[in-house]
Amino acid sequence: MSSTKTYDVRTHGCQMNVHDSERLAGLLETAGYIDLAAVPETERPDVADVVVFNTCAVRENAANKLYGNLGQLRPAKQANPDMQIAVGGCLAQKDRSTIVERAPWVDVVFGTHNVGSLPALLDRARHNKAAEVEILESLETFPSTLPTRRDSAYSGWVSISVGCNNTCTFCIVPALRGKEKDRRPGEILAEIEALVAQGVVEITLLGQNVNTYGVEFGDRLAFGKLLRSCGQIEGLERVRFTSPHPAAFTDDVITAMAETPNVMPSLHMPLQSGSDRVLKAMRRSYRSTKFLGILDRVRAQIPDAAITTDLIVGFPGETEEDFQDTLDVVRASRFSSAFTFQYSIRPGTPAAEMDGQVPKEVVQERFDRLIALQEEVSWAGNRELEGREVEVLVAPGEGRKDAETHRLSGRARDNRLVHFAVPEGAEVPRPGDAVTVAVTYGAPHHLVADSGVQGGRYAVRRTAGGDAWAALQEGGTPGAVKKPAVSLGIPTIGAPPLPDVPAGACCPTD
């Protein structure tokens, strides 16, 4: 294959999809393709030779978005029949051959369990001059064994499990991702150590229900132990994870977070609804009292923890009283931010067949009230941080208005977005470096830290992550996006035991 063939992977959905897209990019580069974004702007074609859609099926508009995007590519396919279009991810797993029936110009459809098949399917479709549809019902190989082209030089995703054993009535993910499969601890730690050796200073552990990690090999305390093991990796500065499930969130994990310095004081804890009646209908096996109790115990050990959540408005049968219960729990929870969704019917889920579907106008009105309340709560929490020093891991392009405001941006340890000013003549940090500044203003959705230009604290700490980012910028072609080199997949290896939990540190709850 000519090295001039380009690819473009377009991602919809969650962090797991983003990480899967890094693997798709790695597979394509290993097969000889070049990232379209890596081509200089003056030489870059309008459309890549291979366009891959990595889809999500969680939201109602996912299919409409996909078919709209496919429709926009049809003229390009007609103009260049050798161009190839592939569709993968959850929507591909769900709709299967329907995609080719609705968009016959698609060349390849692959599912969530056979990401590694993409290059072979493209070759087969090219040779046979016909669409290739391959959907497996179970995982072919754990995705982390595949080549990966990371988007960031200093930050990385690490999957610790795939799939889900829960049966939430609104969610189609278990049907599309399958039952939970856990990686062995040794494989996870080996991957993290390899990333750190490449300059990564921040990792995010990924799992559909990340805190149930260990269920497959019978260790209920495995996730807390894994966090502690991450704390022993030299050079790893920040550890995050997403997303846990409240029903399985145990006190040993809270203690591990509190006692492991590089585990960040941020926690995403999906509530979904504050109504116990609705939670039961959702098959969420916890109630509002248990949820609030978890937050209390987190804040008792990690007082500065920033807690975020997911909320669904308008679940079938939700009454105004149920919605008021949600508002009450949101007030009590003091979330730093929330991802809020209007319930949408997902065919194939139990909730789709439930009575009491809430009218759209009612859902919208409740949604607006929830947004207003959460913004009030977020703003109050951010204003409390004014005057406090924060350490920011600098990022490229986090702030959309950075060029206008002459600020740089990044994430604080608690994952809040911070826009900070660089004093005139002071050292300018690189993406991946750490900066200590004081918050001068707390806005509803971010913090402003202009302490450096106001005569206050401004300190830059150069990191291995900054070094890794800077190394990428050396040489290369102007106008081309620079990403880390493709890394080979992590092989399956033996699993050394996780460390023992210190006495008194482990108090699992039901």
Image: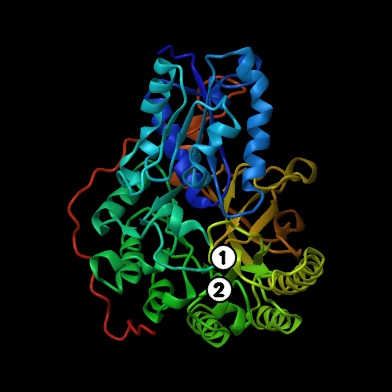
Image position of 401 (left or right of 483): right
Image point (52%, 44%), residue name: 95
Is 466 or 347 nearer to us in this picture? Answer: 347
Three-letter amino acid code of the residue under disc 2: Met
Disc 2 from disc 1: Cα separation: 6 Å
x, y percent for residue 104: 57, 27
The image quarter containing residue 382 is: bottom right
- Dots 2, 1 in contact, CB < 8 A: yes
x, y percent for residue 375: 76, 68
Q: Is residue 373 above or below residue 464?
A: below
x, y percent for residue 199: 41, 43
Q: Is residue 480 above or below residue 12?
A: above
x, y percent for residue 50: 52, 24
Q: Could you tell me if residue 467 is visible in this image?
A: no
- Crowding at dot 1, Cα within 10 Å, few <14 / some 14-19 / many 20+, comes out as many
The image quarter containing residue 415 is: bottom right
Q: Which mark is residue 348?
A: none
Is 477 or 315 nearer to us in this picture? Answer: 315
Image point (70%, 60%), residue name: 446
Is 63 or 26 nearer to us in this picture? Answer: 63
Three-letter amino acid code of the residue under disc 1: Phe
> In the rendered view, how is the structure colored?
rainbow
Q: Which image quarter is the C terminus in?
A: bottom left
Q: Could you tell me if residue 84 is visible in this image?
A: yes
Image position of 205 (left or right of 67): left
Identify the secondary structure beneath mark 1: loop
Q: Which mark is residue 282?
A: 2
Q: Is residue 257 above or below residue 53?
A: below
Q: Which mark is residue 170?
A: 1
Q: Which image quarter is the N terminus in?
A: top left
Image point (34%, 38%), residue name: 146
